Image (spheres, coloured by chain):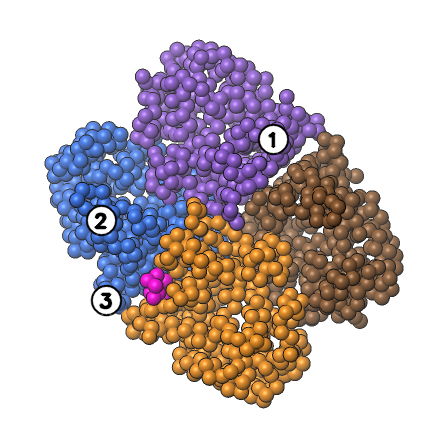
Chain colours: A blue, B orange, C purple, D brown
């Protein structure tokens, strides 16, 4: 069986997933065969060029037109485009792999999760950082109980690409199109990572949040306009209480000068601790019982998650490899018609937290997550 | 003129300050002459032994008895002992150097600050980390404007000495004696550090806080008791808004496995950033305009604050040196009868934030600081 | 024009180069079209399977049989196989891309360089670490003169895969097949890196070396044998003098417990310094005039070498990307029939240093490099 | 019994040792009582001022005049002054604590060691870095056998205070006064550290060395002269073979831009490894059996060497504390008339290595150490 794939979105995420699909045969020979069938977008010229470069045999400007031709829809568009195509695809029995955050609003996310629940097709959300070998190894260490009872989660995702007030406006800065800013784009990753690493103990019960927009309009080069308003947050912070009793602190910013893509998480348990940073994604800092300090470990051994598919110890992988791993797992789920995690339900669970953080910011008080 | 010093407290802080006093003549020859006159405490045997070791000529078990014999009272007792002796000393015209936090409660702190305001004597609070060369250098860089407008403050103070549930009870775990736990002991340092580094921009307008006690009773070896209740926080977190518009996140814990005395702060400005960690106190990480990454700088050059008193470049100082610097500055203020900062007013300002964090935790909402 | 490629070797290096070839169209659209025509090896079964996975249309067990079918021969076999096929290919006008070190002996290397000189085809040696963005950026900084006159080069390449005395024998441990051990395998990289980074100033005039074999026989699982002798070095060190007057120290080991693939180089100039480590290959530590400490820089900006082909700032690449870059450059040279560096002459220059280090070890004295 | 101390030298080392003596009573109450009796130097004005600041009751311009007044002579003068006063003191039954390296020449060092052997007084050499808690802890780990058989020692001591060609001339740059440059000043520390950490296995059998002077004259501000020649090395490197079979590489420089006082050593054993850097002297990086990476450990626990005398965990000490520890141990040896290490014999053993490195540099060949 060859899976026919349609991909909506041909820029950053389109390239990341197309690359993943292209690399599966050489590195994951047991992955399903895939056919990069159709690339979907609005600008025909750019689309043709992208399809050529990314190896798609067809293009389409209307997603609805191609649902009957494909087995899987990759929904990689701006957040506001996640909703209708994903629901329609699932209703048509087409599996959906959707970028994060699930939706721009909680109500849309609920509709998407509902559609996934009612469909026989597979619906996955592309929280790719779950597929870092170091992150999976970290989860194993926590799940084993060796780190003891978890007391603290400390996650932040820092970037600095908006610190220049003349950095241009984009859809990511529009509430209508993106839902939120650093919160949905970066915070969604942090919250999912905490949920993944802690397993059942990662359920968040209540949150207190703060959002901030430092620069409230930015230049555009569209004719007739000088600037457009920034209607999302440049940065957020949050405090949370986990169901297990652990405390969590979360933060993200696009104004953190000196940080390009600094997605870090630290977890302190009663018997051990660990730290991870995306900018050094082949490493994990781990303190196990009996250790006096954090070990700095290269997670590049053949026994480490996914590493036997790649290179010998110490020969590092890059950011893009997370996409290969998640595509492999997602497509196997599609082929075998088995459940995939993170699912739309996971995406919805994250969205509930995002929504509660926004609500907390507006109301100035803690919000319980129902 | 020789200043006669009385020191209340002869354990950890007593030793730290006695050492500082002893080292002044060799390293700060222009410091006032001091006489380690009297050591004050309750246990006569321990007190005699400590006075002998720490170089005090007299001992006293009642602080009130010696106020007339001394020029300066060092109040290094448990937090609940900060109040009455400090006020009495100031009313008697005796200068007071008081450990942090200023008091166990906001109302007590207000009384102390009032006493300081009405006294001609000098009242200082021993926020010793202001006197780290790296911290003073960091403040200079921020005050110069080179880092631009400050957007983010990120401070945490992590320890792990309570993670063992069998770690014994002490006065630091009693609300009555300590006021609060990690919040007052560690958080007070973080908040003062932010205020010091940012100057006027460091005023905190509103806070949202969370306190947590993970282990609520601990063993004692006193006869007739097995355990005593822990009535303070093991950990806290807080989000704040500065008057300048910057966002801040604060956290401290005594349950952060793998961190012994990890007092860190990071500040992101529109044109630069810096990071500091107490466990590497001779270093500062600094990103200045034009830099592509954080510089890791040894703050051990002769031009760096206080370093010309010590050793050549790269010959590091230790934690205790902060006490030498602050004693030098405080005693010069006493000698010259000039204002000292951090003053009791600074201590009160920090206490207002501590109090607001506690109130926020209780009420589950943001608290404005009047 | 499509280049027909024949690849000799289908294990580690075969996979690394096949992957590079497969990725060019998506990430380097202006690269020549290539046809993975034939995979060459001895074990037919393993070869078929590898050809299938790595995307080759044909296989061959005799390299001589296919020279007429290909435009380029990738010679990725054990070192002793580098010699004859490369020479024959060059004589047949087939371009050759040969893994490092150039040859097991200096005399063989001379023959290969001679063949390259006399051929109209392109001959390149696969010193892939020249193609790290951080390394190319480092070279730019040195070549600009901003770091001043270079005084020190400090290079080491540490691994630990042989520290277990029961680690099995392989061809890499045979003098006949490999020429040398850590010296040729790891030291060749260090020496080439120094030559590349320093440019003309990187010429090495004299060396003093030390080689050591810690474990002199190792188990094999071949029938009829229990162990085979280790006839190469487990570790080497060397001191060198550069023509420019700079001093260099070099070292490699397969017994450096705790180091998996730790290829580091530090260069100190009169006006600045830099440091690089392969285990953190997206980073460069750089001290420029005016800096007080090393900046830790992510070399992942669009302006950095090759990065515009990949991902946004902070989205790291991996070890394998060096192969994509070098394949791109090598194949462009083949297509345009222009000179490629590192050439066989570069490979020979490195080999002269390797040989001099061995001779120095044998004779116990410094060796001038003619 | 109170020990009367005479100190020859009142600058950098004079201050470091005077401070150590002054701190003993408070932190090492069981240390012998000492009387800072006489400070010895040539410039009477500077001497008076120094004696006042450093707490000496007398001064002398001729060391010979005071030998009968003292129990211990601290010989902290330039290296060429180490010889005669130390020998005379030992012959007079006065214990001697001499700064490193032992002497400017091997023959002088032999005479000093001979004098020590024949004297009933105690002779110690001030290799202070043996008294770092992290170094002592490291030695314990190696001596326990837990790191297995040692294969590699990698030591370097990098400074940059001479990289400016206009940095002024000093006695440290004169062969007559200092013996050698970076070799004796910095290399002596590295070699002693290797010997200390490895114990019996640390005996060096043969060496190959390289010395270099990058700037061969430097300005003086003495009248009638513009510059003086630099007659010692600015940098050295060495390869060594230990009696145990381990390999060692050593290097020091005063031209290593970006390094202020960077004394590092790494040791790789068959079962573990460790790393230490003087610029982070409270830390040790340790890889023990079972670990996957180096632990970064704060050596500041009460069980760690000397730490119970100082502060709680994580409250770091500084460079100067090494002097307190070594003074404590040396003076106890004097009081109890027991052997002290490092002794003059240790100083001589180091000097043999220094001398062999110089001879190797001159002759261009390996030198066996008799």
The residue beneath circle 3 is A363
Assign a secondary structure to mark 2.
strand
Label 3: chain letter = A
Q: Nearer the viewer, residue D237 or A298?
A: D237
The residue beneath circle 1 is C244
Label 1: chain letter = C
The residue beneath circle 2 is A227
Mark 2 closeness class: few <14, some 14–19, many ≥20 residues within 10 Å: some
Give the Cα distance between marks 1 and 2.
Answer: 56 Å
Visible residue check, residue C368: yes
* Residue D38, position as x, y percentages in the image: 79, 65
> Of tags 3 and 1, which is closer to the observer?
1
Mark 1 closeness class: few <14, some 14–19, many ≥20 residues within 10 Å: some
Q: Which residue lies at the image location 44% right of the left edge and 28% below the top edge?
A: C13
Q: Is residue C93 above or below residue C355?
A: above
Q: Which residues are magenta?
A: B237-248
* Residue C302, position as x, y percentages in the image: 36, 38
Visible residue check, residue C84: no
Quarter holding residue B363: bottom left
């Amino acid at each position: 069986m060859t899976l026919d794939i349609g991909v909506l979105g041909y820029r950053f995420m389109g390239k990341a997933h197309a690359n993943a699909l292209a690399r599966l045969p050489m590195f994951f020979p047991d992955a399903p065969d895939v056919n990069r069938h159709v690339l979907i977008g609005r600008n025909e010229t750019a689309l043709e060029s992208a399809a050529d470069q990314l190896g798609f045999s067809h293009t389409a400007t209307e997603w609805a037109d191609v649902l009957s031709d494909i087995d899987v829809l990759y929904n990689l568009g701006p957040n506001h485009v996640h909703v209708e195509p994903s629901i329609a695809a699932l209703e048509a029995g087409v599996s959906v792999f959707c970028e994060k955050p699930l939706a721009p609003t909680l109500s849309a996310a609920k509709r998407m999760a509902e559609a996934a629940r009612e469909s026989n097709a597979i619906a996955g959300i592309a929280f790719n950082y779950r597929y870092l070998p170091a992150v999976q190894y970290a989860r194993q260490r926590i799940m084993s109980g060796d780190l003891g009872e978890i007391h603290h989660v400390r996650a932040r995702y820092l970037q600095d690409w908006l610190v220049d007030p003349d950095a241009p406006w984009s859809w990511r800065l529009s509430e209508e199109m993106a839902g939120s800013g650093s919160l949905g784009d970066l915070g969604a990753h942090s919250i999912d990572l905490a949920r993944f690493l802690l397993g059942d103990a990662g359920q968040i019960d209540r949150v207190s949040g703060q959002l901030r927009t430092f620069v409230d309009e930015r230049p555009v080069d569209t004719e007739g306009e000088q600037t457009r308003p920034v209607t999302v947050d440049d940065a957020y912070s949050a405090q949370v209480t986990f169901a297990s009793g652990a405390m969590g602190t979360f933060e993200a910013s696009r104004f953190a000068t000196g940080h390009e893509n600094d997605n870090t998480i630290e977890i302190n348990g009663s018997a051990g601790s660990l730290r991870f940073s995306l900018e050094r994604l082949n490493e994990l800092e781990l303190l196990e019982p009996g250790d006096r300090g954090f070990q700095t470990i290269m997670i590049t051994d053949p026994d480490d998650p996914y590493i036997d598919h790649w290179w010998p110890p110490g020969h590092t992988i890059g950011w893009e490899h997370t996409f290969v791993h998640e595509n492999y797992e997602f497509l196997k789920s599609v082929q075998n018609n088995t459940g995939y995690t993170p699912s739309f339900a996971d995406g919805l669970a994250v969205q509930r937290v995002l929504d509660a953080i926004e609500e907390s910011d507006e109301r100035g008080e803690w919000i319980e997550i129902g």
